[in-house]
Amino acid sequence: MVYNFGAGPAMLPAAVVERIRDEFPDWQNGLSPLEISHRSAAFTEVTERAEENLRQLLQIPKNYQVLFVQGGSRAQFSMVPMNIAGQTDRAAYAITGIWSQIAYEDASQFVNIDICCSNADSEALSIPNEKTWYLNPEHNYLHYTDNETINGLEFARPPKTKATLVSDMSSSLLSKKIDVAKHGVIYACSQKNIGPAGLTIVIIDQSILKKAQPGTPLLYDYHSYIDSRSLINTPPTFIWYIIDLVLQWIVDEGGIAVIEKRNNKKAQKLYNFIDRSDFYNNRIDPQYRSRMNVPFQLADPQLDKTFLELAEKRGLMQLKGHRTVGGMRASLYNAMPEEGVDELIGFMSDFAAERG
Ligand SMILES: *Cc1c(COP(=O)(O)O)cnc(C)c1O
């Protein structure tokens, strides 16, 4: 048995991979899901079911549009300001790690930005107390990164603000209950909890949409996706087909409440083990520890390479931390079963006993 702890592209549910294997050569009338037109009736069923399940799982209100867009979450860093702000407007960005920093840099071409808080001088180990944030009634929107995938830092709840909330939920969407109505825009690329890489889900309150900024390319204009039901051009049909299977899997598992409970339990187990150990360390403020991405360091970084080699021999894959943070990172997305976490803890325990 192999468990993939990679941060993205990440592990898919085993049941989904098996279904893809079974349907791969003959999905509809002898055609593979790779070969189906995005305009066909069979594919329309896929897109309609995917949207319906997503709406039901996340309780998305009727006045919100659900879009499927290419270009990853990174494209949204620009698309959001191009579509909901004017060039003379002001927006606030909460800098809580590497992804929010990049989101701010990309967006600053399209809107004036105030950094409302930053944890850069504290190595991104915690989220600054909201009472200290710089917020201004002029802010057109406030952008925050719900879960900092690289740093392993997650908001416990959305920030309180009168401004329109925009959230990058790339690595947390579908992992827990969320209040969509508190947000103007939520976006998430597919390669963490939703499927393979290729499509980004954008959930947007139609009433905050503006006319796109002058010069916005057609493919960066949300109206193009609304008007065409996200079929402005040929989408990655195979990825959409897999996303539909992943959403069906979440429904079959019992929905978001069941998934969330499971995720909390998995993360708690691993953090408890790390906290009790003298050999492993996680430095993130416990209030804001990510349930999805658990970075940890070994007492002796010289052992990192051996740790990774032996882990792979035990079928525990892709545990290497991001190059900017170092050490290890275990990503525990929806598809990771609790047994995977048990295996990891067993291995970490053996390794510390032998080398610690
Ligand atoms: C993965 C990730 C991104 C980048 O997504 P791409 O699809 O590679 O553009 C952005 N933000 C967060 C929080 C992520 O985890």
Image (spheres, grey):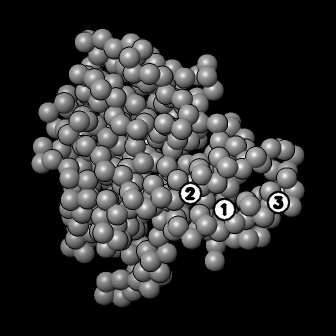
Residue 52 position within the rendered picture, expressed as x and y whole percent measured from the top left: 20, 61
Report if the beta carbon of the residue with label 1 is closer than 8 angstroms to ligand 1: no
Instruction: Please tell me how many numbered marks the rendered image carries.
Output: 3
Residue 129's quadrant in the figure? top left
- Hey, which residue is sitting farthest front in the picture? 276
Report if the beta carbon of the residue with label 2 is closer than 8 angstroms to ligand 1: no
Circle 1 sits in a helix, a strand or a loop, which is it? Answer: helix
User: Would you say the residues marked 3 and 2 are in contact, meaning their CB atoms lie under 8 Å apart?
Assistant: no
Q: Could you tell which of marks 1 and 3 lies nearer the N-terminus?
A: 1
Residue 122 position within the rendered picture, expressed as x and y whole percent measured from the top left: 61, 22
Left/right placement of residue 287 relative to residue 352 reads: left
On the question of residue 216 being in view, the answer is no
| Residue at image location 23% in from the left, 67% down from the top | 49
Callout 1, which amino acid? Answer: Ile
Q: From the image, tell me which residue sits under label 3.
A: 353
Q: Quadrant of the N terminus?
A: bottom right
Q: From the image, tell me which residue sits under label 2.
A: 269
Circle 3 sits in a helix, a strand or a loop, which is it? Answer: helix
Q: Could you tell which of marks 2 and 1 lies nearer the N-terminus?
A: 2
Circle 2 sits in a helix, a strand or a loop, which is it? Answer: helix
Q: Nearer the viewer, mark 1 or mark 3?
A: 3
| Residue at image location 36% in from the left, 52% down from the top | 176
Residue 17 position within the rendered picture, expressed as x and y whole percent measured from the top left: 48, 75
Callout 3, which amino acid? Answer: Ala
Q: From the image, tell me which residue sits under label 1.
A: 345
| Residue at image location 61% in from the left, 19% down from the top | 121
For label 2, the crowd category at 10 Å Cα-Cα, with few meaning under 14, some 14 to 19 and many 20 or more, is: some
User: Would you say the residues marked 2 and 1 are in contact, meaning their CB atoms lie under 8 Å apart?
Assistant: yes
On the question of residue 166 being in view, the answer is yes
Residue 278 position within the rendered picture, expressed as x and y whole percent measured from the top left: 76, 46
